[in-house]
Amino acid sequence: MKPTDFAYLLPELILLLAAVLVFLLDLVGPKDKPKEWLPYVALAGLGAAALGMIPGLRSSTPHMVATMLVSDPFALFFMLLAIIGVAIVILTAIPFMRSRTPFRGEFYALLLIVGLAITLAVSAANLIMIYLSMEFLSITSYILAGFLRQDRKSGEAAMKYFLYGATASAAMLYGMSLLYGATGTTDLAGIAAAFETKAQGELIWLGVPAVILLMVGFGFKASLVPFHQWAPDTYEGAPTPVTAFLSTASKAAGFAILMRVFLVAMGSMAAQWSALLIAISLVTMTIGNLTALRQTNIKRMLAYSSIAQAGYILIGAALAEGGNGASGSSATTVFTGMNGVMIYLFAYVFTNIGAFAVVTAFEQATGRTEIRDYAGLIRRSPWLAGLLFVFLISLAGIPPTGGFLGKFFIFGTAVQSQLWVVLAIAAVNSVIAAAYYLNVVRYMFFFPAEEGAGPIAVAWPLRTALLVTGTLTLLLGLDPTPLIAWATRSAQLLAWK
Amino acid sequence: MNSSLLTLIVFAPLLGSVLVLLPWGKWLNWETAREERLIKNGTTLFSLLPLIMSIMLWFGYNKAAGGFQFQVDVPWVPVLNINYHVGVDGLSVPLVFLTTFLTSLGLWYSARTIKTRVREFCFLFLLLEMGMLGVFVSLDLILFYVFWEVGLVPMYFMIGIWGQPKDRPQYSAIKFFLYTLTGSVFMLLAILGIYFWTGTFDIIEAAQLQPFAGNFLLSSLAFWAFFIAFAIKVPSWPFHTWLPDAHTAAPTAGSVILAGVMLKLGAYGILRICLPIFPGTFKAYALVVVALGVISIIYGALVSLAQWDLKRLIAYSSVSHMGYVLLGVGAAAFAVGTKSLVDASTMALNGAALQMFNHGISTGALFFLVGVIYERAHVRDLKMFGGLSNKLPYYYGLFMVAAFTSLGLPGLAGFWGELFVFRGAFNIVQIWAAIGIIGVILTAAYILWKIVQFTFLGQYDPNRISHWTNIDTGAEEHEPRDVSFFEKVTLWPLVAFMVLFGIYPTPILSFFNTAFFSLMSGFAGK
C-alpha cells in the first residue's frame, strides 16, 4: 500500500475518527447533564468525510486502494449518497431520540459507523472485504434497530432482523466460497478473468448456484422478495429514524454491492443473472405493492412500498450489462440500466427519508403511526401534509418530482430493451402503488381531524431535514440535468468491461 | 412579448396560486372572513389575467399564415433532448381561450358558493388551470406528459374535498385518478418508445419522422397506448365509468371544468398526437375508433335517458357528445391519404373540434345551471321537480338555450359541430354515420322528455320540496327564487357564445380549418 493511497481513504478514516470522537465525548463531563450538541459533532464529521472525498473525485481514473478497496466514481456516488442520507437521518433523529432514550451519544456514533460500513461496502472489490463490510453494516444495523431497549417492538425488530440477516449472510458466504473454489481467487477482477479464460459453459454449473446464493445476501440487504419478510416487522418496530436509514441508505448499499459483484465478477454470466433479476424484480414489486395495499400502519405501508420500489430499481440493475438499443442514437448512452439504478436510488433516498421524517415528526408529537391517525392533517399542520403529499406522489412516480425521474429512466431502459411484458407488469404496478399512497393523502386531506387535535410541533432539526428532502424531491423533477450528468459520469467501475 | 405570451398564459395561474397561499390575513391583520373574501375576489380578478392574454392570443394568431405560432423552444434537459417547446396552432388557440374563460367563470361562481376551505379551493383551481393550459400549448411530449399529470392532482382533490358526502366523493376521486393514471403510464411508455425510435420528444419532429414506420406491431402498440390514455379522458365507451361518478361528486365549478375542458384534453391528445404521429396506424384502426365513437353516442344517450339524477344525466350526455368527436376523428383517420376525401375529412375534423368547443360551452352552462337549482333545492332528483317554468321563468329561459344547444338545434352553437361531423363522416363511413344519427334523436328525447318535461313543465307542487334556500341570504324559504345577479353574470357570457357561434360560427371555424386542412392535405400529398 502506497502512502498516497491514504488520500483515497480519507472519507473512511474521517468517519472512523468522528465516531470514536462522539463515543469519547459522550463519556467525558458530568453524567446527568445531557450533551445535546453531540449530534452536531456527528454532522460535522459527516461533512468532513464528504470533503474527504475530494481527492477521489478529482482523480480521473479509478484507483485500487490497498488491494481490497477501490476508489472509482461508482463507489464515490454511493458514498456521497450514504453520507448525505445518514446526515439527514441524524437531523430527523435529534428530537425523536431526545424524548426516548438517555443513551443518545452511542446512537449518533453508531449512525456514523453504519455510514463507515456503507462507504467500505460500496468500495469493496474483494469477496472477503465485501463479506466483512456487509456483516459490519448488518451488525451495526441490528443494534440500531433494537436501540430502544425498553420498547418491546424495537427488540422484536432487532431480533427478526438479526435472525434473517444471519441466515442470509451464511448463504451468501457459501456462494462466495463456491466462487473461490471455482476460480481460486476472491478478487472480483480475478474471478472475472478466471470465468473468461475457461471455456464457455465450463464453470456455469458452479456459477449459477453461486449467483443464486449471493442473491440471498444482496436480496436481504435490498429487501427483495423472497428475502423481505424481516422488513415490515423491523421497519415497524425500529426507531423511525433507523427505519428511514434501513429503507434508504442501507438498501442503496445493497444495490451497489450487487451491481459491482455481478457486473465486475460475473459479467460473463450476464444472461443468467439478468434473467434472475428480472424475475425477482417482477415478483418483488407485485408482492410489495399488493401487500402494501392492505396496510393500516404507515410504517408498515412504507416498508412494503420500499420493497416494491426495490423491484423497480432491480429492472435497472438487470439491464445494467448493456441493452440492445433499438437505435444507435445518443439516447443509448444516457438511458442505461446503470443510470437508471443510480438516478432512481438518489431520488428515492431523499423522497423516502423525507416521508419518514414526516412520520417521525407525527409520531414524536402524537405517538401514533396508524394511517387513520393522519386524518385532517391538512388542517392541523398544512406544511407537514403538503410535504408528505409531495413525497408520496414522488414515490408514486408522478411528475414533477424526483420519483418520476427515476421511473422515467427505469422504464426508458426497459423500453429500449423492448421488454414489453416486464413493462406492462411494472406499469400496472405503479398504478396499484398510487392507490395506497393516495390512501394516506385521502386521510390527510379529506377527513376531518379528531376533536381537539392541534397543530403538530416540529423541532428545528426536523424542519431542516424536511426542507432539504422536500426541496431536493421537487428540484430533481424540475431540473434533473445535474443529477443525470453526475450519474452518467459515475457509471465507471474499476475492472468493469 | 410575442414569444413569451404562451409562457405568461401558462404560468400566470401558478403565480396566482402561490399568491393565494400567502398569509394575507396575518399581514393585513384582517379576520378570517374578510381574508377569505379577499382571496376569493383576488383569485377571480387574477384569473382575468390569463383570460385577457388568451384573447390577445386569439386576435394575435395569424390565421392566414397558419401553422404553429408564438413558439418558444429552449432546452430543458439537453442531455435527453427534452425541450421547453410551446406553440399554438388553429386547434389550440380556441381551446386555450375556452380554458381561461371557463376558469374565470368557475371562480366567479365558486367565490359565491364555496363556503369551506376557500384558500385551498382557489389554490387548486389555479393549479388546475395551469395544467390544462400547459397541455394545450406543449409541443414536447415530456412537457405534455408533465402538464397532463399536473392537471390530474388538483381535480382529484377538488372532487374529494368539496364533493357532496352522499355522492361518495372519495371513491369518485380515487377512481378518477386511477383511471387516468393507468392511461397515462402506458402513454409514458409510448412516449419513450417514440424517443428511442426517433431520438426526439418533439411532437412536430416526431410527426415528420413517423416513428415505427414499417414495424406495424410496435406502431400499433404505441398507437393504442396513446389512444387508450386519451380515450379514458374523453371518455369513450368502455372507459367511461369514472365519469358519471366524478362529475356527480365534483362541486359545480369542478364539474364545469371537468366536462368543459378536461374531457377536451383527451380529444385534443388524439388530434395532436395520435393523428399526426401515427396516421398510417390510425387509418388501419380507424373503423374501431369510429365504432367506439358511435357506441359512445348511442350508449351515452340511452343511459342518459335512464337517469333520474339531473347531474348524472348531464354527465352521461357528455359521453354521448364526445362520441361525436371520436366519430369525426375516426372518419377523418379512415380517409388519411385519400386525395378525393381531403375535403370531407377536413370537414369531419372541423366538426369534431367545433363539437369540442361547443360542448365545453354548453355542458359548462348546463353544469352551472344544475348548480343553480341544487344550491336552492339541495336535491337533483328529477321526480322532485316539475312546474318550475312558472316559478323560475328566467332560469327556464337560460336552461332552454343551453339544453337546445346541447341537442343541436339549428341557430345555436351545438348544431354546427354535429352537422359537420355527420356531413364529413357520411362521405367516408356512411353506415356508421347513419347509425350515429340515431344519437341525435335520443339526445332530443332525453333533453325534452327528461329534463324539460320533468323539471319545468307540469304543475308545480309545493309539497315536494318545502324548503328552498335563498341563494343571496342563505335563509330557508317556501318558494324558490329566480336566478340571482351573480348567476346571471356567470351564465350570460355562455349563452351569448351559444347564440353568437350558432348564428355565425366562422370566427372559430376558420381557426380549426387552417389547422386541419393543411394536416389532411399533407397526408394526401404524400
Image: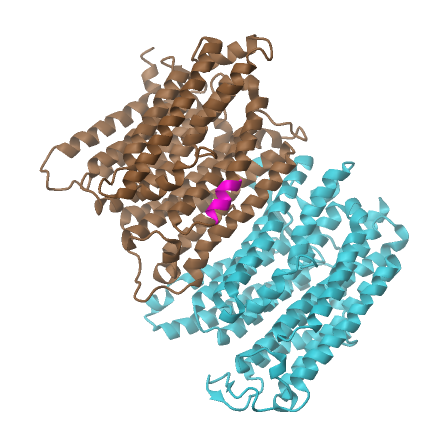
Chain colours: A brown, B cyan
Image position of B91 with respect to A410: above or below: below
Q: Residue at x 64, y 46 (%)?
A: B187
Q: How many marks?
A: 0
- Considering depth in this image, is B494 or A440 the residue closer to the camera? A440
Q: Main secondary structure of the magenta part?
A: helix
Q: Quadrant of the C terminus of chain B?
A: top right
Q: Residue at x 54, y 91 (%)?
A: B479
Image position of B405 with respect to A295: above or below: below
Answer left or right for A223 relative to A29. right
Answer left or right for B459 relative to A229. right
Q: Position of residue B233 (x, y in %)?
A: 64, 57
Q: Residue at x 47, y 34 (%)?
A: A226
Image position of B8 with respect to B438: above or below: above
Most extreme residue toward the right is: B340
Q: Is residue A306 magenta?
A: no
- Considering depth in this image, is B521 or A392 the residue closer to the camera? A392
- Considering depth in this image, is B12 or A262 the residue closer to the camera? A262
Q: Position of residue B21 (x, y in %)?
A: 42, 61
Q: Position of residue A375 (x, y in %)?
A: 39, 60
Q: Residue at x 73, y 62 (%)?
A: B296
Q: Position of residue A138 (x, y in %)?
A: 34, 29
- Considering depth in this image, is A113 or B51 the residue closer to the camera? A113
The residue range painted magenta reads: A286-293
Q: Is residue A4 visible?
A: yes
Q: Quadrant of residue A430?
A: top right
Q: Is residue B519 visible?
A: no
Q: Quadrant of the N terminus of chain B?
A: bottom right
Q: Is residue A290 magenta?
A: yes
Q: Quadrant of residue A249?
A: top left
